[in-house]
Amino acid sequence: MSLLEIRELVAVYGNVRATHGISVTVEEHEILALVGSNGAGKSSTLKAVMGLVQIASGTIRLDGEDISGRPPYSMARRGIAFSPEGRRVFVETSVHENLLAGAHVLKAAAATERLEQILTYFPRLRERLKQAAGSLSGGEQQMLAIGRALMSRPRLLLLDEPSLGLAPVMVQRIGELIREIQSRERLAVVLAEQNANWALKLADRGLAIEVGRVRFEGASRELRDNAEIRRAFLGA
């Protein structure tokens, strides 16, 4: 059984359809990339899983349980965490407070232990614990957003455009961190990315999404080597 199964998902914003019957499976301990242009439906798929957008039809199952339309706090308690596009850190509060905000499903002692684990992944955040999150660089804020999501000890981590607005050297570093964390914690990771080439190099499998529909699906290497995909999604 797959960890997550999305079947014929139609996610909507009012009367506007963001996806048109997307189906996705996520296996335990894998990295899956959803690639495509802005507005393709990648982010809406992640938000539907997290309970942040309305589902008009289709189902979302976690370990076989139908979780379609459950609220975000219910998803967090089931081991799903979400790092949103644009990072969305609390800019006026400290790095320490931002991280603890992600630990609301943990008891105090467990949150303290988890914080120490997260800071081993992101030593730069340890150096800036007392700083306001808004004073961090874009790359540091992305680390903070991912670290905050990881505080809840998730089984499934959803990352929405983690490379957006970052310098190439920082994009490379974020990719290395995602791989390291996924390996150490045995997470499943789904990342929605416009930077398709980077995402497919990082991921085990990929789905290319266009106008709310899955156009291609397969092992990342196969997608990178496909001439049609390279023209349409990789700019080659």
Image (cartoon, rainbow, N blue to C red):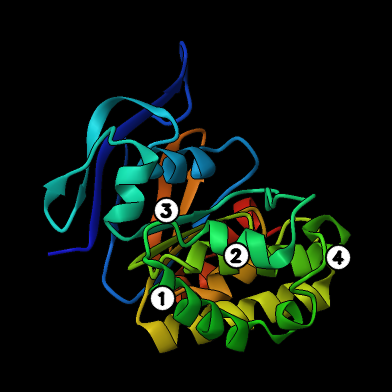
Quadrant housing residue 52: top left
Which residue is drawn at the image coordinates 71% and 65% (left, top)? 95
Indicate which disc, 2 or 4, sits on the residue closer to the N terminus: 2
Residue at mark 4 to residue at mark 1: CA–CA distance: 30 Å
Residue at mark 2 to residue at mark 1: CA–CA distance: 14 Å
Q: Mark 3 points at which residue?
A: 216
Amino acid identity at mark 1: Ala
Disc number at residue 109? 1
Q: In this view, does 134 lie to the left or right of 211?
A: right
Residue at mark 3 to residue at mark 1: CA–CA distance: 45 Å
Which residue is drawn at the image coordinates 64% and 48% (left, top)? 85
Indicate which disc, 4 or 3, sits on the residue closer to the N terminus: 4
Quarter of the picture containing the N terminus is bottom left
Q: Is residue 109 above or below residue 25?
A: below
Q: Residue 154's spot in the image, x, y percent?
A: 37, 66
Quarter of the picture containing the C terminus is bottom right
Residue at mark 4 to residue at mark 3: CA–CA distance: 35 Å
Q: Name the residue under label 4.
A: 137
Q: Residue 112's spot in the image, x, y percent?
A: 49, 77
Which residue is drawn at the image coordinates 49% and 82% (left, top)? 181
Is residue 101 in sight in this rendering?
yes
Amino acid identity at mark 2: Leu
Q: Mark 2 points at which residue?
A: 99
Indicate which disc, 3 or 2, sits on the residue closer to the N terminus: 2
Q: Is residue 99 left or right of residue 27?
A: right
Indicate which disc, 4 or 1, sits on the residue closer to the N terminus: 1
Q: Is residue 2 above or below residue 202?
A: above
Q: Residue 39's spot in the image, x, y percent?
A: 60, 35
Disc 2 is placed on an element classified as: helix
